[in-house]
């Protein structure tokens, strides 16, 4: 087992790069200094809380249902985050919750059903976080892109509806474009695996002393499940967003572009 430990000194050293980013943002007048500082501070507080909370969860004597409660919390919070980041879509929470729940159920069933990882408190929460977290980011893109496309192409879509098309058919071209945009990032990340970057799970396993080939197989399986989860989340969220932007009488509801 490796004894590599990053303490406060290493953490503070990593902030040097953040300071460079803040300086560059200020030089270019991007108005991102405050968001960067807030995001760094927020992540620090959140990760410290998570680190403390995970200590009892990873103990062998801790009942597994505590970890399952954490996973449920991850799903609900991910749905809330999607809703918050796509404010122009009405009543999105239920759709986002369904998408995140589907991803969690399918992803965890594959990972632990196929015994890729042993099911225990040490693996359940981190794996669920990786699967749901990646899907959440893509679902946000899907919801915002569909909403923006409806706002930008409203006249074209309404013309199709006037001709008797269903909302799905009238919006088909823009919908496919929005879904492709939301999924493409994860596809590119998967394609660049091992060439451009070594993902976190693999790096962590290697640093922990696991055989590199075992770490490779574990990471590949996890990345493939994440990719499938992203597709599921994007399709469910994208189609659900279109449904929320359509009234019962097949009309588009008013949509404003997010500022």
Image: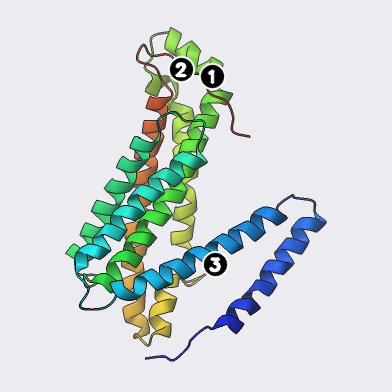
* Residue 227 image point, x, y percent: 37, 55
* Residue 108 image point, x, y percent: 25, 59
Label drawn at residue 154: 1
* Residue 14 image point, x, y percent: 62, 75
**SS state under label 1:** helix
Please tell me which of labels 3 and 2 falls first in the chain: 3
**Where is residue 120, by image quadrant?**
bottom left
Number of residues whose C-alpha sits closer than 10 Å to that of mark 2, classed few (under 14), some (14–19) or many (20 or more): many
Instruction: Identify the residue at horizontal 35%, vertical 48% (top origin).
Output: 76
Instruction: Identify the residue at horizontal 43%, vertical 84% (top origin).
Output: 207
Q: Quadrant of the N terminus?
A: bottom left
Q: Would you say the residues marked 1 and 2 are in contact, meaning their CB atoms lie under 8 Å apart?
A: yes
**SS state under label 2:** loop
Looking at the image, which is closer to me, 192 or 111?
111
Looking at the image, which is closer to me, 130 or 115?
130
Relative side of 2 to 42, left or right: left
Please tell me which of labels 1 and 2 falls first in the chain: 1
Label drawn at residue 252: 2
- Distance between the alpha carbons at the discs numbered 3 and 2: 42 Å
* Residue 165 image point, x, y percent: 38, 14
Residue to which mark 3 is pinned: 44
Above or below, 23 against 247 in this view is below
Looking at the image, which is closer to me, 147 or 47?
47
- Distance between the alpha carbons at the discs numbered 1 and 2: 8 Å
Number of residues whose C-alpha sits closer than 10 Å to that of mark 1, classed few (under 14), some (14–19) or many (20 or more): some
Q: Nearer the viewer, mark 3 or mark 1?
A: 3
**SS state under label 3:** helix
Above or below, 99 against 161 in this view is below
């Amino acid at each position: 087992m490796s004894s590599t430990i990053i303490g406060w000194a290493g953490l503070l050293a990593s902030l040097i790069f953040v300071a460079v980013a803040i300086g560059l943002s200020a030089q270019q007048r991007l108005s991102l200094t405050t968001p960067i500082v807030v995001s760094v501070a927020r992540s620090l507080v959140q990760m410290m809380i998570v680190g403390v909370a995970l200590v009892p969860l990873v103990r062998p004597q801790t009942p597994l249902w505590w970890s399952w409660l954490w996973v449920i919390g991850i799903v609900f919070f991910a749905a809330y985050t999607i809703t918050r980041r796509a404010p122009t879509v009405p009543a999105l929470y239920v759709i986002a919750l369904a998408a995140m729940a589907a991803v969690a159920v399918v992803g965890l069933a594959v990972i632990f059903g196929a015994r890729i990882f042993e099911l225990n408190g040490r693996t359940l929460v981190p794996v669920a976080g990786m699967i749901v977290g990646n899907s959440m980011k893509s679902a946000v893109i899907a919801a915002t892109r569909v909403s923006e496309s409806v706002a930008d192409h409203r006249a074209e879509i309404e013309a199709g509806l006037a001709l008797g098309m269903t909302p799905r058919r009238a919006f088909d071209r823009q919908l496919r474009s929005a879904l492709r945009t939301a999924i493409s990032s994860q596809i590119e990340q998967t394609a660049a695996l091992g060439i451009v970057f070594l993902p976190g799970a693999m790096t962590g396993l290697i640093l922990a002393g696991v055989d590199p080939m075992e770490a490779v197989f574990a990471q590949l399986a996890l990345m493939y499940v994440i990719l499938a989860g992203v597709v599921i989340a994007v399709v469910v969220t994208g189609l659900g967003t279109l449904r929320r932007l359509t009234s019962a009488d097949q009309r588009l509801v008013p949509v404003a572009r997010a500022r």
